[in-house]
Image: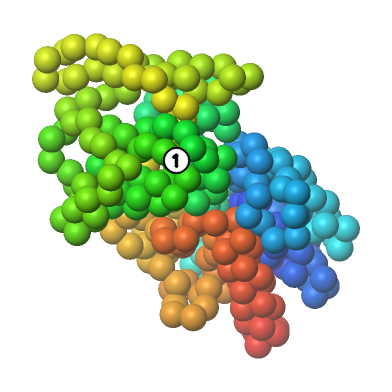
Amino acid sequence: MERISEYRVVIIGSGPAGCTAALYLSRANLKAVVLEGLQPGGQLTITTEVENYPGFPEGILGPQLMDLMRKQAERFGADFKMEQVVKVEAGKRPFVVVTEDREYECDALIVASGATAMQIGLESEKQLQGFGVSYCATCDGFFFKGKEIVVVGGGDSAMEEATFLTKFASKVTIVHRRKEMRASKIMVRRAQENPKIEFIFDTVVEDVIGSKNGGVTALKLRNVITNEARELATQGLFVAIGHTPNTQSFKGLLDMDDKGYLVTKTGSTYTNIEGIFACGDVADHVYRQAVTAAGTGCMAALDCERWLSGHE
């Protein structure tokens, strides 16, 4: 297998965090390579309109924003490789990052591999992502002003998303597969007391009806107790059943919380291993925004640069 040793820093992940880290490192004359993984550009590449990223008063398409970020980093010398990381060897320096095709040696490593929104698993859901199906209320809620929408989920995230969406939607229906909610009692009560929110229990979504031109128009629902099927008219579907951090390659190596998110030292991007830094959604289960990911990408690059300066 080909072994490459020309890079000081390897960045895993090419979303806002990874691209921002690459930009800062390259401007500091530190040779860096970004291993893009299976989804170059991260979650923004499956987002249509982005209206809450600073600097774009008219909004911008998610894929276009990521293309601009990548080009800006490349302008200063960062390299991007569409390769998926298989494992990381961090017992000694230089670290070795192994992909399916190559081995990359590096003095420091930035993990910006992000998190993946869990999906219901429907083909129609996949087809209508960005066209009425969303996984982020704070990202897309604005587009549903005055509309009737559905939130799927029963945890705190679902309650938070539904409550937030009532700022825009005329009606929010929470669909949950069980009678009992996993969310905390205070979150459930807050949702129950909101006049815009209704609940449908013991029910699953079996199909999303709509088109890319017309958006979502209805959902096919099935009651798991009675097996009764029905159609519910709606103009949007928000799936809030959780996120999975992309940390499989780091199990047993980097410290994680009980949900698999990387743990960093307070006020920094340092992980438990010297020379390895984490940023973006892979270490953030609270905010999960493009702008916060970019901010921590900047932090990781600065932390990395200072650490390298002290370990020449």
Tell me residue 284's x, y (percent): 45, 61
- Is residue 93 left or right of 2 when viewed as pictured? left
- In this figure, which colouring scheme has been used for the structure? rainbow
Measuring 37% from the left and 37% from the top, which residue is drawn there? Answer: 171
The quadrant of the image that shows the C terminus is: bottom right
Observer-nearest of 256 and 170: 170
Task: Indicate the amino acid at tag 1.
Answer: Ala
The quadrant of the image that shows the N terminus is: top right
Measuring 83% from the left and 51% from the top, which residue is drawn there? Answer: 71
When asked about the image quadrant of residue 173, the answer is: top left
When asked about the image quadrant of residue 212, the answer is: top right
Q: Mark 1 points at which residue?
A: 169
Tell me residue 166's x, y (percent): 40, 46
Mark 1 falls on what kind of element? loop
Vertical placement of 43 versus 254: above or below? above
Tell me residue 191's x, y (percent): 26, 49
When asked about the image quadrant of residue 231, the answer is: top left
Tell me residue 85's x, y (percent): 57, 46
Can I make out residue 20 in this image?
A: yes
Q: Which residue lies furthest to the bottom in this view?
A: 310
Observer-nearest of 235 and 17: 235
Vertical placement of 25 versus 176: above or below? below
Vertical placement of 120 versus 259: above or below? above
